[in-house]
Each structure stands twice: as C-alpha cells, then as structure tokens.
Image (spheres, helix red, strand yellow):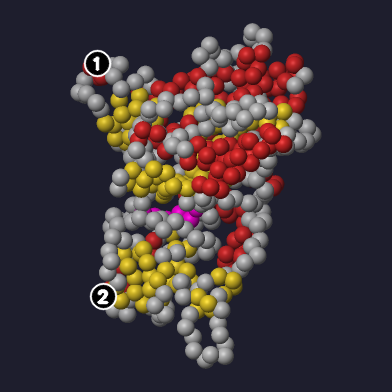
Amino acid sequence: MAFWDIFKKSSQNSDAMEGLPEIFLHKTRARREEDGSSYEVVCPYCLSKFHVWDLQFRSASNSDADEGSGTQHAYPLQEDEKYEQFWADMNMPVADIMKPFILRLDDTENVRAVQLWDSSEWLDMSSSENREKVRHKAICRVKDKFGGISKERICPHCHNTLPEVIGRYPNYIFSMIGNTSSGKTVYLQRLKSSLMYNGLLPRRQMSLQLLSETNLNVDMETKKMFVNTVQMQERLSDATSVGYMYPVILELIRGEEHILVTLFDFPGEAIWEENRTAFFSTLMQRNSENTDGWLFMLDSTTLPSIRSCVQSYGEENLLSIKDKDDAQQNAEPVHIVSEFTKAFGLGNQVKCPVAFTFSKSDVIRYFANKAEAGMLPGLTGSEIFLQQDLNPNRDKVELDELYQCNQELERFLEGNLVLNSARNSCPQHAWFAVSATGVEVRDGILQAVAPACRVVDPLEWLLWMVGAVPGVATKSKNWARRLGASTPSSKR
C-alpha cells in the first residue's frame, strides 16, 4: 500500500469496518517538478513532454507589415512550418499558415518582461537577476518589444495553442482507441454532451470546462448526430480518418483545485501495424511513454455470442461492419487486444490503467430480452451494466457499482479468450459496457432518440485510478485495494 492513501471513516479495526463505506484515493500520477512550483507538460496534440520553461507564446503585436513606412510597429505574420507540417502529417493540411510571431522566453530581445502566476508584477527580462528568478517557473503572460501582451501559450514542438493553465495544475492524458466501427466517434460525442450537463460526479460541486470547443458547438453536433439523423433517417457517422486526431481537452474545477484532462482519440486503423506511417509510429511511441490511461473501445457485435444471436434471428442489419470480407474490421476482441498490447505494451504489458469498454450495449440488451434461455450465458437477472441511470447523488466514484458491472461482464465473457488476454497484458483493468445511442442502430441508421447508457463510467474509473478523484466502496474493498496496490505512483 505504499503507492496509495486510504482515508477511513471509522477506526482501523477491520472488524468494525466491515459493512461500512471506505474512501479510497490513489496517489496522483501527475508529476510535479522538483521545486514544487509546476507540473511536467505533455502536449495534448503531439504528446511531446517538456518543461514549463520551454513553452512559447504567440505575440499579440501583429499586423501586415507596411513596407513603405520605414518604421516597424508590430511583427509581420509569418509562415509557421512546424504547425503546417504537424497537421499535414495528420492528414489535415491547414489553409491559414500565416501565424503571429513566436516569442521564446530565452529571447530577451523580443521578450522584454514576464509575469508569474498569482502576481501582477512585470519582471524586466533584461535583468539577469530576474531571468534567474523566473527560470523554470510557470509564466502566465509575456510583453514583447512593441508593448504587446500575450497569454497564448503554444507547444514548442508542434506550435498548437495550449490551455492557459497547462503546467500549473495536474495534467492527465487518457487515450482512446478501438477498431474501425467500434463506436468511438459516436461515444465521444455523447460523452462530451453528458459532461457538459453535469454527468460527471454531479454532487462533487465540480465545474467542468471544455477547452477544445464551445458548449454551443457540442450541443449543435450532438443534436445533429442523435436527433437530426433520426428525423432525416440518415446514417450515423462513426469514423476517425487515418492520422487525424483532435484532442478533447477538459478542465475540472473544484474550489482551488484544477485538473486538466485530455482525451486523445486514435483512429481505429492505428491498431494494425500495416496502417501506420512513420510519423504515426513516432506519435504512438510518445503515447506509450506519456499516457496515464486507456479507454479501449470494443464493438460488442463482434462477440461470437452476439454474432450467433444475429445469425439465429437473421438480424445482420444490427452489425456495423462495412466490409464482411475485411479481416481487420471483423477481428474478434481477443485479436484486437493482442494488437493493442504489441503496439503499446512495454515488456508485453500495458503498464497504465485500461478501461475495456464494450460499445453498443443496447444490442446486448436487445438479444438478452429476445433470445431463448441459454443463448447468452453469463447474463444475470440484474443486468446492472445495461441500466441507463447512475446514482445522481454521487460525489465519489461508486466502486461497488462499477465492480458489479465488471463482474457481470466477466461472467458474460466467460469462455471468450479476451478475458485471459486482458488479464495477462493489462494488470490494471476493468470492464465496462456503454451505449451512446441508447437504442439499436440498424443499417447504420439510429432508430429513435433515447438517453445514453452509462457513458461516463469508464472516465470516472480512470480518473479514480490516476488519483484525480476519490472513490467509495463497501462491498468491493478488496477489488479497490488490489487495483490500488498495483498502481505506480507516477507514469511519467
């Protein structure tokens, strides 16, 4: 138990504790710098790791240069090759490559003064004493030689704009991956919508800001995906282009506590080695080194038991596979987990927490209600992982409930090789089942507008596993202790 802290509600007497809730909080995996003033930064775009001192700023003193004036009053816009190359490698070339001038903190010719967090004082960078004073500190604003003040931080490697508070607070990277058509894109949209409407630990008095896009955009895209498609009988879009990944960046705020969380979405094709470019392989290597946890999406309709039901009832239109002859698209979960381990395992094991998440649990529910006895062995009467409603009063992760979901899914998967594969390759894992649509999708078309099913479970578990939020257990204390005992104090 050296790697985690347990806060108890009563005495240390284990007999007295029997049947009483116990609060579990792992030691944080976010790494603080030696002087304690800041945290290590991992770029949510290119996944490069660096110190807060290496952050760069875009100047606020920019204009189209007036060549005839003879006097420079601002920096001219410049072509940003790093920014352009990064998005070209992502298969997303950008049209606007003329960007504001880049200010480096060690460039005292252009950076005249800086401001530290929680300070209104401007420190003159021409002073060697001031330069030493601010070295390795988190800078919140800089002043350039034209007097322009900028707080737009950028990554020194890919030149993408970073959250203003990055480096000041814990920064967790959760990576999402799943085979083609596993449901990641649809799931991620529903998850963002659920988070915007207080779906994450609702009684924790924690506000959530989506830094990567506006709430209005989330609302519009959610309505387009889950309402308009039903009305227009259009196909759901569920494919992330090969090489394209735009992170979802969240800031969780509770009083003075701030936590940054990045959901980094890998395209499904990335699981298979033959689909990766050299750049993409490099990005995946950085991910192996710097990610804090995985949300691994598996398509429940690829399970042999579900496929058997599909064939028995002649309901192939419930399958989302576009090409029945494509071996990758039709791969069973055990083969996908094996490829995942080869790509991201260190010593044949994935060292950080993995939330194995079956999408389209609505299909499991559909056949559980329809199928003859014995066709879906392992399902119990409660079917907790198919319920739509979570405890609306939770302010801690409900470990008993997640444990029961995990146990029921393990029973449901009994006999499938994916169980042993997960146990051997991912020591810290749990099983989840979600439905972003709430109802079945046939021939790619959503049948009705319905509430989602348990979409926040995997994220809450990952946040608990990295020490970002507490969990509470009564019946699942041994499970919580076992997961905690195998959790390293820091991934990075």
Give me the residue at 40% from left, 40% from top.
Answer: 466
Specify the segment rendered in magenta: 39-44
Is disc 2 placed on a helix, strand or loop? helix
Instruction: Please tell me which residue lies in front, 39 or 363.
Output: 363
Mark 1 vs 2: CB contact within 8 A = no
Classed neighbour count for the residue bearing mark 1: other residues with Cα under 10 Å, few (<14), some (14–19), many (≥20): few
Residue at (64, 39) in percent of width and height: 225
In magenta stretch: residue 43? yes
Q: Which callout, 1 or 2, points at the residue further toward the start of the chain?
A: 1
- Quarter occupied by residue 450: top right
Q: Nearer the viewer, residue 245 or 453?
A: 453
What residue would you read off at disc 2? 129
Depth check: 224 or 110 in front?
224
Magenta segment: does it hold 386?
no
- Residue 138: percent from the left, percent from the top? 34, 61
Q: Which residue is mark 1?
A: 15
Quadrant of the image occupied by residue 26 = top left
Task: Answer yes or no: is residue 184 visible.
Answer: no
Q: Residue at x 21, y 20 (%)?
A: 13
Direction front: furthest residue: 231
Q: Position of residue 244 (x, y in %)?
A: 63, 51
- Left or right: residue 225 versus residue 151 is right
